[in-house]
Amino acid sequence: MTTRSTELLQVVHRTPGVTRADAARALGVGTGAATELVTKLSRASLLVQGPAAPSGTRGRPTTVLLPHPEGPLALAISITHESWRIDVVELGGTTAASRQGRNAGADWPQVHAALRTAIHQLRLLYGHRLRAIGVSAPGTVTTSTTATTSTTVTTPAAATPAAATRDVVPTTSLATSRPPRAGSTATTPDTLASGTTSGGGSRSWWMNATTAGWLDVDLTTLYPDAEVFVAGNDATLAAAAESHRGAAVGASVALHLRIEAGLGGAVVEDGRPVTGARGAAGEYGHMPFGDPSIPCACGASGCWGMSVDGTALARHLKAPPPVDPISYARRVIATAVPALPALHTLLSAPTPPPPGTPPNSVPGKPATPLPGTPPGPCHVAPPLSLEVTPPVAAPGYPQDGTPGTPLPGKAEENTAGGQALDRANVQSAAPLDIDPAAAAEAVRAIAASLGRGIAGLVNGLDPDLVTLGGLGVDLLAAVPDEIQSAYRAGLMSIHRDSPPPIVPALLGENGPIAGAAAEAWTALLPHLA
């Protein structure tokens, strides 16, 4: 494929629904050259043209560029300590189908078997169209390349994407190198984004999720013969996604923190996560901001993540460690509603209409979305179902389809979106049989720890804003005063007049899987023929 062809596919992927005329302008080519490129890509089953939405202006109607109905697909996988999800993603980010399952308390072989079964079923459905896979993992991700004697002809990866993470290795090694396992051949430099190297060999991606007890896991065994395989830490992938099409769009330096079973995060500077010397930056949950008497599974003591998640709530309530810390934390918050004024007011208010709902819509009657409405959350089909779900546009794409355009509501105005997400999480959680006042006190305690830690990171990193994902969204809606009070008290005086705002992640639970899909497509596009 020519460079221009690849560039056109990149434009179509970044800007769903782009017109042929706008794509030509983005590439700096004339309409004739654009028509020739589109014809070539149509013959290769990569693009088709469709009618554009009426603009209300005079002139010859233009067409929009869409993914070919028989074109390539990427699998995006999100693995957490409690669940997993697989999306089949088209060029442009539309989710064609999705699968999910629960795995709280499961060992890795069980999770691995469930994922392999789901992947196998999707391969039966889509066959050769599945060309790439991106995995979001709840722990550190490292990579190694094993030399072989075979000769493989490969295509160099594209330049490092802006959303590349410390765990995704395009043209230069950003992930931590890993020594070969016993009995394997020596490792070679990482030079490609796919599962093969220019010298003939295969790449393995290794996960260590200490909290879940999933250690030394070779993620590539999920889809060993994938043409393109990339993987990354969930918080890092979510941070990249937030900076490109979420709450941190436009920030020169953004700090993203995600609370699941523990805490992770990343600093994104000018659209690119800061990865560190060995690609292991962002393990903020293992900074010693917590109680030094509490040991962490990582081998250290006093880790901050141990003081802000569901296990911390259990300790405050003198309960045993929960198997499912996220679900448990949300049940504690649901129990505390009567004793938390901010959250009680939020849940008592009328449910706001979804973004893009016309102001004159009738309650209870489906309304036609306004033109340019950003896509909503991906649809999730029943676990392991063979039914193909209706295509759903991926979350977080810019409203007008222009790369880098902020979504409706600037970063500092996105609190309402986070509260709506928290409302759904809390209302679906079953309260525990404990005193609401005790639950509220525990929630306030971890919120204060979260605020103090954020202050420490802001003092050291000087970001423009801080985005919170996972349980952080729930805490920000439930006890905003406790977080803000501890945050401001811990800030240096130079930050207090205008402290970086703390806002909920706009992509919500979709952040990690959106990041995984973006990385898979970024690595795949140069390989398409």
Image: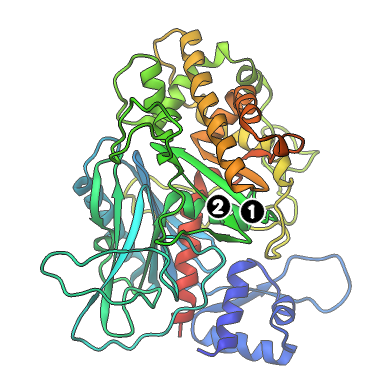
Question: Dot 2: within a 10 Å radius of its alpha carbon, few (fewer than 14), some, or many (20 or more) residues?
Answer: many
**Which residue sits furthest front?**
493
Give the label on residue 253, or none.
1
Residue at screen point 36% across, 85% down: 154
Residue at screen point 41% across, 47% down: 381
Give the label on residue 496, or none.
none
Question: Dot 1: within a 10 Å radius of its alpha carbon, few (fewer than 14), some, or many (20 or more) residues?
Answer: many
- The local secondary structure at tag 2 comes to strand
Left/right placement of residue 274 relative to residue 132 reads right
Indicate the amino acid at tag 2: Val
Residue 499 x %, y %? 71, 38
Residue nearest the observer in this picture, 376 or 173: 173
* Placement of 460 over or under 418, stated as above or below: below
Left/right placement of residue 299 relative to residue 68 reads left
* Placement of 173 over or under 374, stated as above or below: below
Residue 233 x %, y %? 41, 53
Left/right placement of residue 486 relative to residue 439 reads right
* Placement of 441 over or under 396, stated as above or below: above
Mark 1 touching mark 2, by CB under 8 A?
yes
**How many marks on residues?**
2
Residue 15 x %, y %? 65, 67
Measure the C-alpha gap from mark 1 to mark 2. 7 Å
Residue nearest the observer in this picture, 244 or 306: 306
Residue 379 x %, y %? 49, 48
Left/right placement of residue 286 relative to residue 509 reads left
**Which residue sits furthest left?**
183
Indicate the amino acid at tag 1: Val
Would you say residue 396 is visible in this rendering?
no
Q: Which residue is mark 2?
A: 267
Residue at screen point 80% across, 38% down: 360
Looking at the rendered image, the quarter that the C terminus falls into is bottom left
- The local secondary structure at tag 1 comes to strand
